[in-house]
Amino acid sequence: MALRTIEAIIHPDGRIEALEAVATALPQRAIITILGEEVLSTLTTRSHRDRVRAALRTGGLLVEVPAHPSALALSEEDRAALARQYAAGTPLSQIVIEDREETF
């Protein structure tokens, strides 16, 4: 079974009430994160994905990585070398074929 996030309410007596249907063929393990009221108040106006990300970030389980880390940026020399290696207008299929021929 894939990871799934389900909102639930934990009552003072310890009873857990899922806010959506949960059905499994076999017993499943789960990890429960209890969100404080301050976290919940910031989550109520966001989309589901944003709420999940915020909860993971709050729990220290998510670290944002920049979309284009500077460590992966190409230098001007690298760009020029790639431009010389792959001429503009060469079909991608041809580039792949040539690359495969070089490896065999």
Image (cartoon, rainbow, N blue to C red):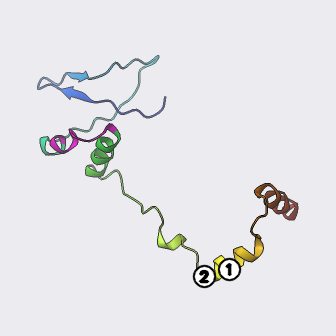
Q: Is residue 48 left or right of residue 3?
A: left
Please state, as top left, top right, bottom left or bottom right, where the C terminus lies in the image: bottom right
> Residue 85's spot in the image, x, y percent?
77, 73
Q: Amino acid at mark 1?
A: Ala
> Residue 6's spot in the image, x, y percent?
32, 30
Please tell me whether mark 1 sits on a helix, a strand or a loop: helix
Could you classify mark 1 by the number of other residues whose Cα lies within 10 Å: few (under 14), some (14-19), or many (20 or more)?
few
- Residue position for label 1: 80
Q: Amino acid at mark 2?
A: Glu
> Residue 78's spot in the image, x, y percent?
65, 78
- Residue position for label 2: 76
Nearer to me, 96 or 65: 96
Q: Which residues are magenta?
A: 40-48
What residue do we see at 77% from left, 70% from top? 87
Magenta segment includes 58: no
Please tell me whether mark 2 sits on a helix, a strand or a loop: helix
42, above or below 92, in the image: above
55, above or below 77, in the image: above
